[in-house]
Image: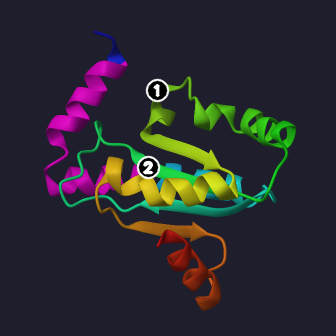
Amino acid sequence: MNLTSHIQRAVMKSSPYWPFRWIYGAVYGAILLWLMIRVRRIPEIKYLELRAARADHRFGSSDLDLRAETTELTASEFFALSNRLANVLRPSKRWMRVLDFYIFGPTEAQLQRRLGPISFGESRWIRLLGRRKSAQESAQETASDK
């Protein structure tokens, strides 16, 4: 077992204790802030959302689930964007695996929102970046769900 695995096991075992939860929360928050700053600079991304952590969240074994919605892109533009974000989408560094980050086009994002409860349960998603939806957009989304 290597050093990284030992650290991960120690984090998982100490995660239920409040002083450690605060420290780990700060580290996760710093990684999340880094991603938010990076994504904010990419004009093709309209929204960034975070799945709210449950009360029993275990640092070290549970990841932060994030999804980004892009503007309407061609396939080549989408792949170019994916390539720019490759180190977050498919991280090689173990500490970056804290994030489960996905990007979707508008249609795929709508489908993911509809099917998300199947895999995530009735989780709450928090919008981190992007404007709030207008009442008309929300009504259209609700009408299309029926």
Question: Alpha-carbon neighbours of circle 2 within 10 Å: few (<14), some, or many (≥20)?
Answer: some
Query: Residue at the spot x=43%, y=53% of the render?
Result: 115
* Residue 19 belongs to magenta span: yes
Q: Nearer the viewer, residue 102 or 113?
A: 113
Residue 1 against residue 129 in the figure, above or below: above
Which amino acid, mark 1?
Arg
Q: Secondary structure at mark 2?
A: strand
**Picture quarter containing residue 39?**
bottom right
Quadrant showing the N terminus: top left
| Residue nearest the viewer, comparing 112 with 70 | 112
Q: Which mark is residue 94?
A: 1
Q: Residue at x 33, y 62 (%)?
A: 123
Tell me residue 43's x, y (percent).
81, 60
Left or right of 36? Residue 27 is left
Name the disc covering residue 65, or none: 2
Q: Amino acid at mark 2?
A: Asp
Q: Please tell me which residue lies in front, 66 or 19.
A: 66
Going 56% across and 23% down the picture, which residue do you hit? 92
Q: Nearer the observer, disc 1 or disc 2?
A: 2
Over which residues does the magenta segment extend? 4-28
Residue 55 quadrant: bottom left
Give the residue at the far bottom of this rendering: 135
Between the residue at mark 1 and the residue at mark 2, the CA separation in whole angstroms equals: 16 Å
Relative height, residue 9 to residue 48 (above, below): above
Say which residue appears at 55% left-offset and 72% top-offset: 144
In the rendered structure, the answer to whether residue 15 lies left or right of residue 40 reads: left
Spot occupied by residue 8 in the image (x, y as percentages of width and height): 29, 29
